[in-house]
Amino acid sequence: MRGPKKGDVVKKRLVKLVVNFLFYFRTDEEEPIGALLLEQCRVEREDDQAFSIAFLDEAERKYLFECDSQEQCLEWIDSIVKASYEFMRKNLIFYRTEIQRLTGKDPLEQYGISDETRFQVNSAVQPISKET
């Protein structure tokens, strides 16, 4: 794994994923000192036990996370990728379309939300791969 560049600050933090926020804490405190909103970001594996998060509008900045094991690292990556609103929205649209194709019924119609723009198919949408 690449070490930090000269001038980079490395701090040990505990993290907690809540919906699409990654809260981070000092190891000796119960209140979070900050949070990352996990939207429009790229999660990449750096090595067996590390991954990074970079935001599309802030590509030069990368947050590096080190895990205790390779398995833990893969679980974090998978959970973070699935945490975004956009991931969930695209999957909802994909499965809505599949259910409608198989049954002929719109599963959202019974909830009165089938015409909402956020649930519309703009083009052929595929579920987001776990590898992204």
Image (cartoon, grey):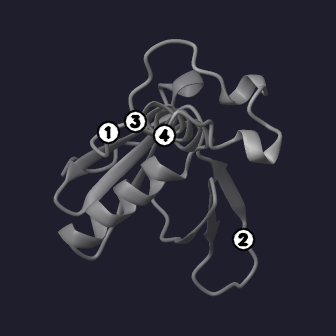
* Residue at screen point 72% across, 66% down: 33
Q: Which mark is first along the chain, 2 or 3? A: 2
Name the mark on residue 129.
Answer: 1
Amino acid type of the residue that numbered disc 2 sits on in the rendered structure: Pro
Whether label 2 touches label 4, CB < 8 Å: no
Q: Which residue lies furthest to the right in this view?
A: 112
- In space, the residues marked 3 and 4 are separated at their CA atoms by 20 Å
Q: In the structure shown, which secondary structural element does the residue marked by tag 1 occupy?
A: loop
Q: Which of the pair 63/123 is nearer the observer?
A: 123
* Residue at screen point 37% across, 42% down: 6
Residue occupied by mark 3: 127
Q: Which residue lies furthest to the top in this view?
A: 123
- Callout 2: 10 Å neighbours few (<14), some, many (20+)? some
* Residue at screen point 28% across, 58% down: 50
Q: Position of residue 103 (x, y in %)?
A: 48, 40
| The quarter of the displayed image where residue 76 is located | bottom left
Amino acid type of the residue that numbered disc 4 sits on in the rendered structure: Thr
Q: Nearer the viewer, mark 3 or mark 2?
A: 3
Q: Is residue 99 above or below residue 27?
A: above
Amino acid type of the residue that numbered disc 3 sits on in the rendered structure: Pro
Name the mark on residue 103.
Answer: 4
Q: Is residue 114 above or below residue 38?
A: above
Name the mark on residue 32.
Answer: 2
Q: Which mark is first along the chain, 1 or 4? A: 4
- In space, the residues marked 4 and 1 are separated at their CA atoms by 25 Å
- In space, the residues marked 3 and 2 are separated at their CA atoms by 32 Å
